[in-house]
Image (cartoon, rainbow, N blue to C red):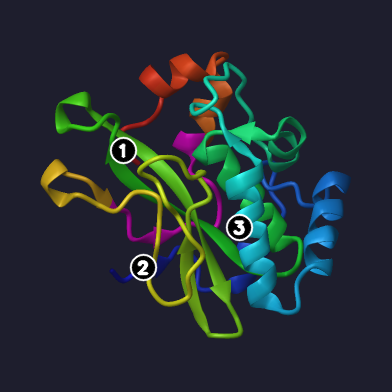
């Protein structure tokens, strides 16, 4: 699938945002630690992705009621849903001058179409060393979910099932979508939000 950038200016994918607060000391510290373990851009992106995927719990998986949003908050509590985790990964990438944006999928909420649909968030990152955007899904792996870092074949958490009316939105956004952030800010219980409060379309 071909993806289109919301902005033609890479600097827009480096912007400091309320939800992508990479000027926070904790984000800077983690970025420096990951950078020290990386030999180049590709290593850093892989290490940042795997950190968010593996060290930040998906709130639904641990049945937590807490809702996190901004990157520093996600890092502090070590949990968040996909909307929040994508904010953290974006912050870690932008903090090192690596352009990063947001992508979305429309997926079924459960395992069948009758359960309704929900918006899932993931990231896109521009790899200067290979001159292209790739998508990364740091949602967190579990049984049946195996997202991986790959420069060749995309390996996201949820392959699209067109027969279930699922699809990829084709835009790489410079900012998290207002509907996703509104969902996080307007609810107080994460479990209830995941069941009844997430947007079904952008």
Sequence-first tag of 2 and 3: 2
Q: Position of residue 189 (x, y in %)?
A: 54, 14
Work out which residue is located at the far left of the displayed protein and give it.
163
Residue range of the region highlighted in magenta in the rendering: 168-180
Disc number placed over residue 201 in the picture, else none: 1
Residue at figure coordinates x 45%, y 54% from the top left:
147
Label 3: how many Cα within 10 Å (few below 14, some 14–19, many 20+): many
Farthest residue, direction bottom: 130
C-beta proximity under 8 Å, tags 2 and 1: no
| In this view, 139 is above or below 9 | above
As drawn, the label of residue 3 is 2
Pointer 3 residue: 49
Q: Is residue 15 visible?
A: no
User: Which x, y percent locates residue 59?
Assistant: 55, 28
Tell me how far mark 2 sits from mark 1, CA to CA. 18 Å
Residue 124: x %, y % from top left = 50, 62
The reply to whether the magenta stretch includes residue 39 is: no
As drawn, 181 above or below 158: above
């Amino acid at each position: 699938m071909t993806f289109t950038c919301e902005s033609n200016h890479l600097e827009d994918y480096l912007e400091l945002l309320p939800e992508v607060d990479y000027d926070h000391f904790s984000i800077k510290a983690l970025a420096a630690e990951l950078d020290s373990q990386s030999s180049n851009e590709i290593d850093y992106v892989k290490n940042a992705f795997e950190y968010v995927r593996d060290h930040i719990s998906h709130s639904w998986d641990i049945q937590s009621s807490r809702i996190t949003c901004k990157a520093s908050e996600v890092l502090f509590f070590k949990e968040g849903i996909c909307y929040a985790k994508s904010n953290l990964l974006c912050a870690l990438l932008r903090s090192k001058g690596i352009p990063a944006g947001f992508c979305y999928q429309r997926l079924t909420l459960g395992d069948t179409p009758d359960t309704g649909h929900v918006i899932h968030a993931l990231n896109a990152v521009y790899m200067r060393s290979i001159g292209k955007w790739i998508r990364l899904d740091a949602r967190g792996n579990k049984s049946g979910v195996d997202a991986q870092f790959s420069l060749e074949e995309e390996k996201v958490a949820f392959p699209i099932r067109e027969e279930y009316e699922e699809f990829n939105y084709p835009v790489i956004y410079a900012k998290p979508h207002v509907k996703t952030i509104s969902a996080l800010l307007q609810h107080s219980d994460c479990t209830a939000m995941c069941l009844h409060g997430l947007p079904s379309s952008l």
